[in-house]
Amino acid sequence: MIQVVVDGFFGDTGKGKIAAYLATADDPTLCVRTGAPNAGHTITVAGETHVLRTIPTCFVNPKTKLAVAPGALIRVDLFLAEAEKYGAGRTFLDPQTGVIEERHVEFEKSDEFLMKTVGSTGQGVGAAMVDRALRRLKLARDFDILKPYLADVPALVHQSRDGGVVVEGTQGTFLSLYHGTYPYVTSRDTTASGLLSEVGIGPKAVDHVILVFKAFVTRVGGGPLPGELTPEEAERRGWTERGAVTGRPRRVAPFQIELAKRAVLLNTPTQIAITKIDVLFKEAAGAEKWSDLPLEARKWVEEIENQLKTPITLLGTGPAPHHVVDMRREKGV
């Protein structure tokens, strides 16, 4: 079975947490990370918070193999550090994965439009993608230090399908270069079909697309955010967050049903996950059963499910991977 985890808003919805939960609950053979180190995926294990910028959060299952997609980008130092810390002996890198060099970072940080208007993280991702389009970017196969990690990741995916594969998406649907709030977007397609292209998976091979929303909407950098709250109101509600990579405060808005409907249209999910239910409904903290959620939270989830016409199967109720209400079996998915 191949499951794709994709973000339905502007990033920061908790894709990493959902991927980590799937790693522990479904025991997949392989997990593949897409994207680039401008996105940090956060997971809390045994009270310790980890921010991974290259390696999949599925590392929480010591039996799961970890891989980076051929369409992804890495920085060599970050990849080596994370591979050693989180996935020693079980981490693979496709020979075609792109490599960000220091010159890309310097170029991006010197671009005033990118840094001040768009709100780039300044990690060199956009500059590296330009080089890739111009066919002059160096790839993982060009670095001797990376050769011990090289493997044919699309082949690994298909070899691992019977044991289960999780594809961990990056950023968010509305940061997609093609479908997002251009020009306030990232430098790749971040929808489900874009993730599949990055990994090397045809749509017929996919069993489930899990679209991840958060109980409220956040966004880092410039661009429109419908329903945006003032920083003071966000703090009053307890919704204040900071970017995992940049540390910048995230802009905040209540859950936006019209954005969610658009994300469903663009990603055609088979199921939906919503994280941070416990932030919206304090009594939901740590719940692992539907019956343990407060009535108000259950009504809220049911109303969203009715409007999106897609089963809501996973609800995040806390920072740890096991803080999830899993209703997949009850809903037949």
Image (cartoon, helix red, strand yellow):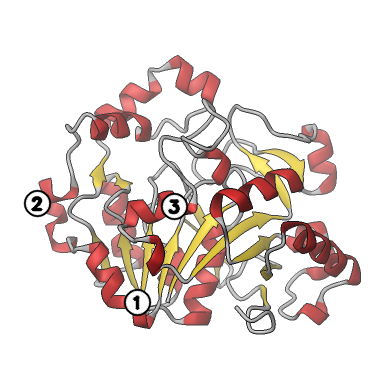
Which is more N-terminal, label 2 or label 1?
Answer: 2
Q: Residue 261, how many percent across, how many down? A: 69, 49
Category of crowding for the residue at label 3, using alpha-carbon neighbours closer than 10 angstroms: few (below 14), some (14–19), many (at least 20): some
The N terminus lies in quadrant? bottom left
Kindly give the residue lying farthest to the top in the view shown: 112
Q: Secondary structure at mark 1?
A: helix
Q: Amino acid at mark 3?
A: Ser
Task: Depth check: give the residue in front, 195 or 82.
Answer: 195
Q: Residue 318, how many percent across, how many down? A: 68, 66
Q: Amino acid at mark 1?
A: Arg
* Displayed quadrant of residue 68: bottom left
The residue tagged 3 is: 193
Task: Depth check: give the residue in front, 287 or 256.
Answer: 256
The residue tagged 2 is: 144
Kindly give the residue lying farthest to the front in the view shown: 204
Number of callouts: 3
Task: Select label 3 or label 1 by which is in front.
Answer: 3
Q: Residue 155, how many percent across, how many down? A: 23, 68
The C terminus lies in quadrant? bottom right
In the rendered structure, the answer to whether residue 280 lies left or right of residue 325 reads right
Q: Is residue 135 visible?
A: yes
The residue tagged 1 is: 161
Q: Residue at x 71, y 60 (%)?
A: 276
Task: Select label 3 or label 2 by which is in front.
Answer: 3
Q: Secondary structure at mark 2?
A: helix
Disc 1 versus disc 2: distance between alpha carbons?
30 Å
Q: Is residue 256 visible?
A: no
Asked if the residue at tag 1 contacts the one at tag 3, i.e. Cβ–Cβ closer than 8 Å, the answer is: no
Q: Residue 163, how many percent across, how many down? A: 36, 82
Q: Amino acid at mark 2?
A: Asp
Which is more N-terminal, label 2 or label 3?
Answer: 2
Disc 3 versus disc 1: distance between alpha carbons?
18 Å
